[in-house]
Image (tube, rainbow, N blue to C red):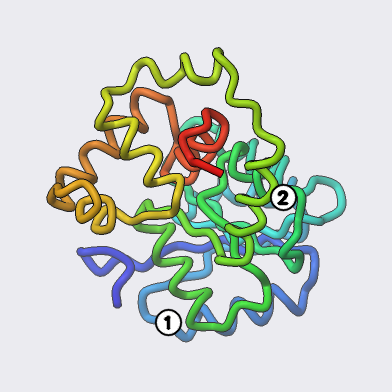
Amino acid sequence: MTGSCDGVPIKVLLVDDEVLVRSGFRSLLEAEDDVEVVGEAAHGGQGVEQARATRPDVVLMDIRMPTMDGIAATREIAATPGLQHVHILILTTYDTDSYVFEGLEAGASGFLLKDAGPAELLHGIRVVAAGESLLAPRITRRLIAQFTTQRTADRAARERLSVLTDREREVVGLVGQGMSNDEIGAALFLSPATARTHVSHAMGKLGARDRAQLVVVAYQTGLVAP
């Protein structure tokens, strides 16, 4: 599989305070023809600097680091002009990490656990590089458990959805359930291309950076049923 239709490799930045972790990731990724490691950073502040300097396609971001953690670094990268194309995949050793939802709100495109196998990690990089969201199944269950009990779908949250058509609201709810464009199309008797168009329109109207942030909206507004 190639990083893009023109054969340009996916540029990846590694941000983790453990040298051995970064070394392991680098060895794995450099063995792939469609992936190029463009930099490393030992904490979030360095990660932000490296992202601005190297303009990667994907950042593999640890959460718990000294100086600046991965959530703060994700927020800074997402807010930096010119880095809108950067997709951040947060890696954590904690499947009950309380930072999951905060990370998505900050602009992360997805989460993977550090115990994921090489094939799962490579798949995750390619998925987020293509603009899709990625949530590890265990983390998704945690997300659902946490926010079906804590969310407050109040009037203000529901009013946020007023800019959407009924169909777009349906689509956002299905994105919140983790469905792909193909799955949304099948559920609503639409072509995948039409489903993709509805997702794109909803993202634009809601100011969502990517599909992962549509998941945030779906939970915040109560579109995803308990």
Instruction: Please say if the residues under marks 2 and 1 sit with CB atoms less than 8 Å apart.
Output: no
> Given the current orientation, which residue lies at the most extreme front position?
226
- The mark found on residue 70 in the picture is 2
Residue 50 screen position, x and y as percent = 62, 51
Relative vertical location of residue 186 with respect to residue 163 in this rendering, above or below: below
Q: Left or right: where does residue 91 sit relative to residue 170?
A: right
Q: Residue at x 21, y 64 (%)?
A: 5
Amino acid type for the residue under numbered disc 1: Glu
Relative vertical location of residue 199 with respect to residue 184 in this rendering, above or below: above
Judged from the image, the secondary structure of the residue bearing numbered disc 1 is loop
Which of the pair 194/105 is nearer the observer? 194
Q: Residue under circle 1? A: 32
**Neighbourhood count class around disc 2 (C-alpha, 10 Å): few under 14, some 14–19, many 20 upward:** many
How many tags in the picture?
A: 2
Judged from the image, the secondary structure of the residue bearing numbered disc 2 is helix
**Neighbourhood count class around disc 1 (C-alpha, 10 Å): few under 14, some 14–19, many 20 upward:** some
Mark 2 vs mark 1, foreground winner is: 2
Amino acid type for the residue under numbered disc 2: Gly
Which of the pair 168/78 is nearer the observer? 168
How far, Cα to Cα, is label 2 from label 1?
A: 25 Å
Q: Residue at x 14, y 47 (%)?
A: 190
Q: Residue at x 34, y 28 (%)?
A: 204
Q: Quadrant of the C terminus?
A: top right
Relative vertical location of residue 144 with respect to residue 28 in this rendering, above or below: above
Residue 193 visible to the viewer:
yes
Residue 182 screen position, x and y as percent = 24, 58
Residue 133 screen position, x and y as percent = 45, 53
Q: Residue at x 49, y 41 (%)?
A: 224
Residue 83 visible to the viewer:
no
> Given the current orientation, which residue lies at the most extreme right position?
66
Q: Residue 208 is drawn in which quadrant? A: top left
Sequence order check: which comes first, mark 2 or mark 1?
1
